[in-house]
Image (cartoon, rainbow, N blue to C red):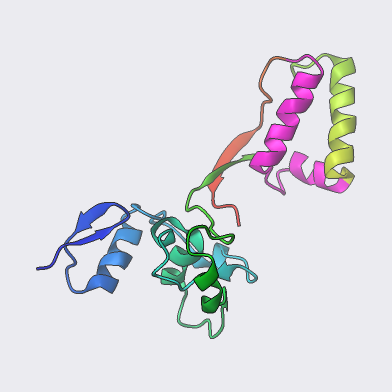
Amino acid sequence: RKLFFLAGRAIIPPVNTTFAIIYLLKQNTIMSPDFNYSEVPNIFLHCLNKQCKHSAKCMRYLVTAYVPDNYPVISTVNPNYFSSHKESCPYFMADEKKRFALGITHLLDNVPHKEALGIKRELMAALKRTTYYRCYRKERLIKPKEQEYIRQLFLKRGIKEEPVYDEYVEQYEW
């Protein structure tokens, strides 16, 4: 049989190349084996350009293998657009899970009261009051950029400890 290379790994496809790609996707070499397409937002932009040198690591391309049969329409990047962007793609989206925080009920427990009030006030101003309380009640995940913002708030107020969240969730950032 013919040897193929996908995502830097040599594979011998059991039946054909398409089956081999799907096999690797399910083996967690590219995407999580428990990937559920229903997590993909309706407005997510897909890519069908398999000639792209980034396709093996691009979420927009890889997710197309999981589109269920009952989806008659998906949004895609115009295939003709890529002829002028061969080296770098502005739509590239790395296939990597991010670490989201869930819950901030103990975020300010070890922070002096005066500093805690200031951090909470600045956090409410940045996130808005409703979003702050949704994060507090674990109704909304705290994105990696927001976690960094909170860490910077701590440092700005002279607090060396890392912010403490209730728990963490690994998932794709759409």
How many marks are shown on the rendered structure?
0
Q: Residue 116: image x %, image y %?
A: 84, 22
The vertical placement of 164 against 174, above or below, is above
Q: Nearer the viewer, residue 20 or 141?
A: 20
Can you name the residue that lies furthest to the left here? Answer: 1
Q: Residue at position x 17%, y 68% from top? A: 14
Q: Position of residue 56 (x, y in %)?
A: 38, 59
Position above or below: 172 against 163: below
Q: Residue at x 19, y 66 (%)?
A: 13
Task: Point out the residue furthest to the front here.
Answer: 84
Most common SS among magenta residues: helix
Compared across the picture, whether 124 is left or right of 135 comes to right
Foreground: 100 or 6? 6
Decide: is 125 above or below 12.
above
Q: Which stretch is magenta? A: 130-159
Q: Would you say residue 140 sits in the magenta stretch? A: yes
Q: Position of residue 77 (x, y in %)?
A: 57, 73
**Residue 23 position by quadrant:** bottom left
